[in-house]
Amino acid sequence: MRAGAGRTQIHDYQHDDQGETVLTGALGLATASRPLGDEAEVVKAGAVGTPARALSVDRLTLTDFRSYTHLRLDCGPASVVLNGANGVGKTNILEAISFLAPGRGLRGARLAAPSRHDGGDGDGNGDGNGDGRPWAVAARINTPDGYRDLGSGLGASADGNRQKRLVRIDGEAVSSQAALAEVFSVQWLTPAMDRLFLDGATARRRFLDRLIIGHDAAHAGRVLAYGHALRERSRLLRGQAPADGAWLDALEDTMAAKGVAVAAARIDLVGRLNAVTARPPGPFPGAGLMIGGELENWLISGPALDAEDRLRDALKASREPDAVNGGAARGPHRSDLIVRHLTKGRPAAECSTGEQKALLIAIILAAARMQMETRGAAPGLLLDEVTAHLDAGRREALFDEIAALGAQAWMTGTEATLFEGLRGRARFFTIDGGRAWES
Ligand SMILES: Nc1ncnc2c1ncn2[C@@H]1O[C@H](COP(=O)(O)OP(=O)(O)O)[C@@H](O)[C@H]1O
Ligand SMILES: [Mg+2]
């Protein structure tokens, strides 16, 4: 198959991941470089002398993050169960962890939306008006290379004119949030993703891109750079003045190079993942994955450089309609992840809600297993209300697979009883009134 030829060329594209667009300033995050408590606590948190098999958030600190003024959880490498009534802030904690990875977190929030509104519970509309205090999340991550400190939050740009996402790694400000992916990796499942197979392709592409970033951290920079060039081109095309041709050419060059790299990485991961998702753990269904898109087809049937030329030409030819319609009619942002339930032999969208959830869990677990094998450490797993659609058999199988992976899973639920199978294997915290205590 020709995909192999494409794969060897992917590396050509990994070299130039500049054009990095989401830049952060030199300003520090107040909480990110907070000095360590006591060393004894750190020694206790990790397995002394043995490299971590999984990436874990051993300590998490939230400052002015959604419903929390200040919260610190010292949890060590074990999995964590968060329980409490609706609205107490369980998902907020998972969202905070999701900001230790590049992107907009598990709610897809606007930059300032997590900033805590005065009055405690805020208006909850997440409109991102920035009327709250600037949010910050800091964490101590246990990795196979030792402990690393990550921080992320809202701050001002160097010129002070703009709000931007700040990122710190080991106390140093870094210029790109994509760098987070080199240190930490996290996958999530939320109730909103129950509709992943039913709604538009955007969420499925993001899901796939997150899986890829877990295996290949450079994918984060590629996706960001492609998106930036795409938005910049749209802005130019829709502007009042006639667009500068040379500038458009340069942006389309970037879109073609990054776009082909993005598509090649998607083909590569889907191919490798299929081998694992076909043999799911326990009672989970086998999943068949396919990436559908014009660019992917070009890449599978011909050399990557040809695909790049074709995309560049296609973009240039569609400037007029794109100026009218917005966005771009061609490119990897039009591709879709297609999933089939292998045992049923049906598209995922035609399966029951429970079956779709089981498929998603099977895919996440397969990707985590692959990541443990290729990267040497399983990713963190954020499983929000994940037990809701699972029968007892699948629930226990999920817990067993998390344990077998050695992964740190953060799970939420209103009923702690659904997690009894994890007693002794996870830390249990009850959340209420903006505080957490071990239960
Ligand atoms: N920016 C914010 N500032 C203050 N409170 C917020 C903000 N965003 C959301 N909240 C509050 O967080 C609570 C929801 O927390 P969430 O983690 O979703 O609860 P659950 O425990 O049900 O998962 C709501 O009370 C909401 O008003
Ligand atoms: Mg919730």
Image: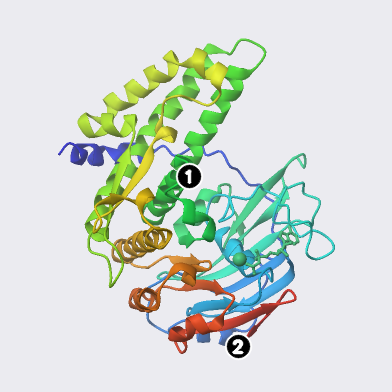
Whether 356 is drawn above or below 268: the answer is below
Q: Which mark is residue 326?
A: none
Q: Which mark is residue 439?
A: 2
Q: If the picture is divided into quarters, which one holds ligand 2?
A: bottom right
Q: Nearer the viewer, mark 2 or mark 1?
A: 1
Residue 21 x, y percent position in the rendering: 56, 38
Residue 309 visible, this orientation: yes
Q: Is mark 1 within 8 Å of ligand 2?
A: no
Q: Secondary structure at mark 2?
A: loop
Q: Report the side of 115 relative to 393 (left or right).
A: right
Between residues 37 and 239, which one lies in front from this camera angle? Answer: 239
- Amino acid type, residue under disc 2 in the picture: Ser
- Amino acid type, residue under disc 1 in the picture: Asp
Q: Residues within 10 Å of mark 2 (few under 14, many from 20)?
A: few
Name the residue: 71% across, 62% down: 66
Whether 12 is drawn above or below 100: the answer is above
Name the residue: 74% across, 57% down: 124
Between residues 272 and 221, which one lies in front from this camera angle? Answer: 272
Query: Marks 2/1: CA distance?
Result: 38 Å
Q: Residues within 10 Å of mark 1 (few under 14, many from 20)?
A: few
| Colouring convention used in this rendered image of the protein | rainbow
Residue 52 visible, this orientation: no
Name the residue: 59% across, 76% down: 414
Q: Secondary structure at mark 1?
A: loop
On-image quarter of the N terminus? top left
Residue under pointer 1: 199
